Image: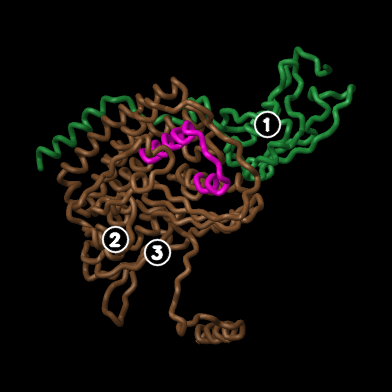
Amino acid sequence: MQKNDQADKFIIPIGPQHPALKEPGHFEFTVDGEIVTGATIRLGYVHRGIEKATESRTWVQNLYLLERVCGICSHIHATAYCLGVERLAGLSVPPRAQAIRELVVELERIHSHMLWLGVAAHEAGFDTLFMYSWRDRETVMDILEGLTGNRVHYSANILGGVKIDVDAEQTKTILQGVDFLEKRTHHYLDVVTTDSAFVQRTAGIAVMSKAVAEHFGAVGPTARASGVTQDIRIDAPYLAYEDFPVEIVLDTAGDLKARFVVRVQELFQSYQVIRAILDKLPAGELAVTMPRRIKENETISRVEAPRGELFYYLKSNGTDKPERIKIRTPSICNFGTVPALAAGHQLADMPMILAGIDPCFSCNDRMVTIHRPADDSQTWTWEMLRQYGISYYREKER
Amino acid sequence: MIGEILKGMSITFKTMFQPPTTVSYPEVKKPVAERFRGRHELKRYDNGLERCIGCSLCAAACPADAIFVEAAENTDEERYSPGERYAKVYEINMLRCIFCGYCEDACPTEAVVLEKNYELASYSRESLIYTKDMLLVPHPADIQKTA
């Protein structure tokens, strides 16, 4: 804790390394007693340079690199990349492959939302819900392992299709798991909406109006909990979402409770769409051949990741490597809302408000260019830097 | 409020009689899925000859550049695989491997297969570069190596 003499206020710095944080980020909360009056966030501690690394790898190698942008929503990154590359190369992917991709995407959404439910409950001090929801999440993890061969980085996609097929036995296991999870999800929906001790921590906390959500460009369940009708699966259907649609889940309350309700309700949509896919899985090929080189072109690819809209920009230059890949992950859109929502709340609510947007630090840490006014130049020559360094250390010695 | 506490405690009470979900690893191990991708193995034919023909397609396909293959010619005196060539050196750097299974897909003879072993921890970086002796499945002792 440090005291700021000028403003006569306490500023509590948290992070970048802090026991309460799962991933590094720096937060400064200005407090008046227990009430937070202002917050600043500094991100970028886990910038890994993935976008630059893609430029020295082939299209195929990048598929596996980009799958590792996020440890939770890995398949959706690979899918967004595949959809973009296939559009660049002018491939038409077989409908069976698209349906299987959608199946894995929805299974991954279940895994991500249940993980979030546990983490958010843990931040509220409700560790029982955390343990139970993670126990049940193992069901979907086992399904994913059985289907794709791995619990986290599934490598289900290849450029031009998918690597895995769904057989009758797999279908049976998935349906059984989904039935069990649906039963449990009804229970969780009951818990997060009726348990009075828990509702005290969520209802009316961090209320974000539709206007605020739109102003900060919030995406995904965070935005939908504030009544913003935005879901890429419905607005711009990709994969097989035209044949196997989902319904939008909205809540207008905009508080933490609404974010719980929206995410838990979205699970039911995922169960319904998984059943529909397994019921009417199109027959046919799993993949088409992908050319090694792609002629000069550019495209964008938008998908709905568990946390919101994920955006890829891809540029090819005629070789077997991309010219430029730009990724915009959903977390960075939602982070802007946190300082705005923090003011006026108890310091104890901060972990919940942060967890409410389902932040993923490492996937959101990437290069951002900020356009400053022209006169606010930050260009220093080598000599200026040297002189600054000398005088800085002289000052320090005194 | 009292009613809700009782409701919550009733769940706790019921759960007390359920078997625990946790597994006492490493004493008890959960079986992995059929499609699980773990440590690689280099397979042999039924007659004991190595399936690997040293074509380096796995090394070319590997997104993580984890595989190194050096091929050499088979001779009638020293025959390792059915074709003209065999892998003299076959190394997989397990520190680089991302277990994506692309090498498996690229292999024309189904020689490299990702098997079920996932306990790969070690004390040194050197020991995690798996050589051909470590990767190759044991030779069926009753079959002679000469074809």
The amino acid type of the residue labelled 3 equals His
Q: Which mark is residue B107?
A: 1
Which residue is nearer to you in this view: A260 or A395? A260
* A143 drawn magenta: no
Residue drawn at x 44%, y 40% is A239
Most foreground residue, A31 or A148: A148
Residue A54 image position (x, y, % from top left): 59, 54
Write down the region rendered in magenta.
A83-110
- Residue type at mark 1 is Cys
Callout 3: few (<14), some (14-19), or many (20+) C-alpha neighbours within 10 Å?
A: some
Quadrant of residue B24 in the image? top left
Q: Which mark is residue A26?
A: 3
Q: Chain of mark 1?
A: B
Name the residue at 54% across, 87% down: A391
Helix, strand or loop at disc 3?
A: strand
Residue A38 vertical position relative to residue A186 in the rendered view, above or below: below
Amino acid found under the numbered disc labelled 2: Glu
Mark 1 or mark 3, whichever is nearer to me: 1
Picture colour for chain A: brown
Q: Secondary structure at mark 1?
A: loop
Q: Can you identify the residue that label 2 sits on? A: A214
Secondary structure mostly seen in magenta is: helix
